[in-house]
Image (tube, rainbow, N blue to C red):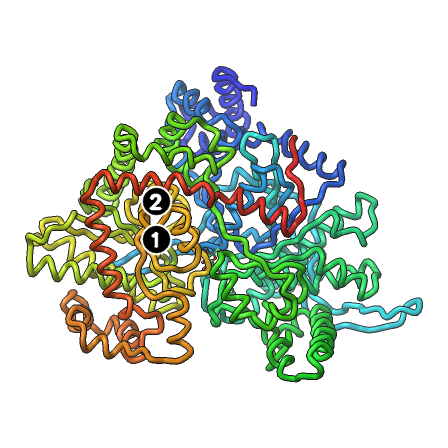
Amino acid sequence: MRLNIEKFKFDFKRKLMNTFAEEIEDAPKLHIYMALGGLVRDYITEAWVNSNNYYTENNIKQVYYFSMEFLIGRLLKSNLLNIGIYSLCEEGLKELGINISELEELENDAGLGNGGLGRLAACFLDSMASLGIPGHGCGIRYNHGLFEQKIINGYQVEVPDNWLKEGNVWEIRKENKSVEVRFGGNIRISQINGRLSFIHENYDAVRAVPYDTPVIGYDNNSVNTLRLWSAEPIDTEFDLFSFSKGEYSKASSYKASVESISQVLYPDDSYIEGRLLRLKQQYFFVSAGLQSIVRRFKKTGHSIKELNDFAAIHINDTHPAVAVPELMRILIDEEKLSWDEAWKITTSTIAYTNHTILAEALEKWPVDMFKKLLPRVFMIIEEINKRFCEEVLDRYHGDWNKINEMAIIKDNQIRMAYLAIVGSHSVNGVAKLHTEILKKQELSSFYNYSPYKFNNKTNGITHRRWLLQANPELANLITETIGDSWIKSPNNLSSLLPYKDDSAFRDKVAKVKLNNKIEISNDIYKKYGIKVDPYSIFDVQVKRLHAYKRQILNVFNILDLYNRLKQNPNLDIVPRTFFFAAKASPSYHLAKQTIKLINSIAFMVNNDAQLNNKIKVVFLENYRVSLAERIIPASDVSEQISTATKEASGTGNMKFMMNGAVTIATLDGANIEIKDAVGDENIVIFGLKDYEVLDYYKHGGYSSREIFNNDRRINCIINQIMNGSLGVAGSEFNMLYDNLIYNNDEYFVLKDFDSYVKAQNQIDSYYKQKDKWQQMCIANIAKSGIFSSDNTIREYSKEIWNTQEIIL
Ligand code: 26Q
């Protein structure tokens, strides 16, 4: 972009004047931030329009990534970096007496996601734009994202996230692109011109209004679109019908019920309850998104039968799986295609990613609920199911067991994963192990039935946000050392590897880490009044709170270490600070007890003078993207300790590695691929293997009580928790106790404890060997490039979407 400091300052002052009628001296900080954001948008508008025109004029195939969640975080810095004017703006603003970092802090995170799945969608958008792949996001513009977490007296308290209260500079409301989405009613079947027609009557209509946000590629003039839909009343129904008759309360309850559709993101990420409003949300954005794709496509003048040559529709888990029958509906009822024509187009356009094998996280919808809300869509699902079951019976010579296993509708429930598989041409898992488990266990019947559909796409993260933006000092050091080609070709980070034997470079990497640690330590002191030692090992577990992620295993090691230190205050360990950050789903009581437990231990440990500051425990409130960007670059140890087989991939693991932390991990999800990349000597592995876990589940043979009775350390820890030693009544932790002892410890916490403690001691001993530790850190950074989502997206593009990288 052609811009110099003087021009920028001029533009900026004018923007502030035009938007708020203010000069810098009397403008509040928020206005300064908004003016800057608005200016960035102005700068990219032309490239945005050009990108779209280019795609349309050249009939280029475009990807539509359908996701209930886009966990974007903040956009100011990443947009400035991607258009290549961050330093220039920083300098220009400085000359105007403005600190750009302060402005960045004013932006509310767009927290429209729960965790990994939502953040993956955001990383994918960044990579698609940066590779020049025409790929857009389609989702919901929630008025409230994931709740804000406050910790009060050690407990999690949820506060609504009001991210839009000051407006959102990045989005544009596209009133004229609104579409109508219909719920409820009944279907009248009639013969029209010798063809059966399905006429939807007595439905409730909702207006879907899109808000577009530009997704700016890195230094390539390519700008894609994130289109998020907002639910609004249809004017006619709202105004004329009820208001004119004076039925104000009826009218306003209609309005509220419509608006509730895009009001708030559901905060559960693993245990699924089939709620009607959630189903409305799903259909709402899927129908709106598909209508807008079809409408845009028809403008090109091509036959709808060619849709799959121009659009790839990707569904992020089963949440948008209703896209399968909805696209069928549009093609059959509106475009008048035959079933077979429509089916061919649908299945060759849609592809599906699975993110979990947890049984309780597989989506199922009760037939009665579904049918009532979406009568026509349900008829289509029934027909898909009928035809599929016939095919299965045919293939397996009338074996009804196969129908039991594979039917889309069973026991009055619609199994959304099965619908997604049957309606897609591609089904992928998100890490090698995960995909293998899908093929061999969870979805084996479908794998045997259509093996060609199944493939693996190991997750990735955008190195632009997670290194270039989040860790500028490290990014600069890397560029000074190997040049800046890694920004466009992240695999080039591997050129850093030889520098692990350069002691001057090692010292520089260590210095950067220390600076990052000092910075966050200062913030922590300001916010929590806790003094953490930046020279201690920063041991970090930040992710959603869930039993399978085993924060409790981490807690057990801390309590054991605490007990050892109480016994022997001279214990020779490197001082350590244990950081946690995690939101618990509001109804997940076990997870909430774990938060209370961590905070109780933190209070006890941090106030125990006998420990000589050898350990500290910090729970960081309100984990979110912008907090991840601060804590990850300051981490020494990355905790990736899920029960083997349970974490589909993990992506935090990759972010830590890229920032030079050493991973302590089970062989689960992408940890396995991280180990393969860095080598056994640059990671610390412990715990049960996938086949051992599966074997216990299948054949039994594990008794947590036996370990509880025989391992003195564990016995001591559990008693401590339950007998009030932590200053909290044991009854507060009764679910934790029941799970570990009465329910035989489903996630093998006690079983893996010993191995974990040894692994932690290993970390301590590596850290004491300063050079070795630094070499490990550098090896991790050097090998992290392969986990850039640019690589992942290239694979999706080549192997699933068949799309091109466009040079604009
Ligand atoms: C579904 C229905 C009703 C309410 C909520 C949900 C729901 C919402 C979010 C279900 C699941 C999620 C999120 C799942 C998720 O984040 N999975 C993670 O996806 C990452 C990206 O692939 C993986 O790295 C993680 O291993 C996986 O846990």
Name the one closer to the observer, 665 or 64: 665
User: Residue 343: where, in percent of width, then height?
Assistant: 76, 63
The numbered mark at residue 632 is 2
Above or below 661: residue 248 = below
Q: Quadrant of residue 685?
A: bottom left
The quadrant of the rendering that contains the C terminus is top right
Q: Residue at x 64, y 64 (%)?
A: 322
User: Residue 273: where, in percent of width, then height?
Assistant: 50, 71
Q: Residues within 10 Å of mark 1 (few under 14, many from 20)?
A: many
The quadrant of the rendering that contains the N terminus is top right
Residue 338 in sight: yes
Mark 2: which amino acid? Ile
Name the one closer to the observer, 56 or 693: 693
Above or below 25: residue 244 = below
Specify whether tag 1 is near ligand 1 (CB below 8 Å).
no
Along the polypeptide, which appears first: circle 1 or circle 2? 1
Name the one closer to the observer, 501 or 763: 501
Mark 1: which amino acid? Val
Q: Tell me the residue that label 1 is attached to.
A: 542
Dot 1 and dot 2 residues touching (CB under 8 Å): yes
Above or below 710: residue 567 = above
Q: Residue at x 19, y 70 (%)?
A: 714
> What is the CA distance from the residue labelled 1 to the residue labelled 2?
9 Å
Q: Residues within 10 Å of mark 2 (few under 14, many from 20)?
A: many
Q: Residue at x 57, y 27 (%)?
A: 43
Name the one closer to the observer, 577 or 196: 577
Q: Quadrant of residue 543?
A: bottom left
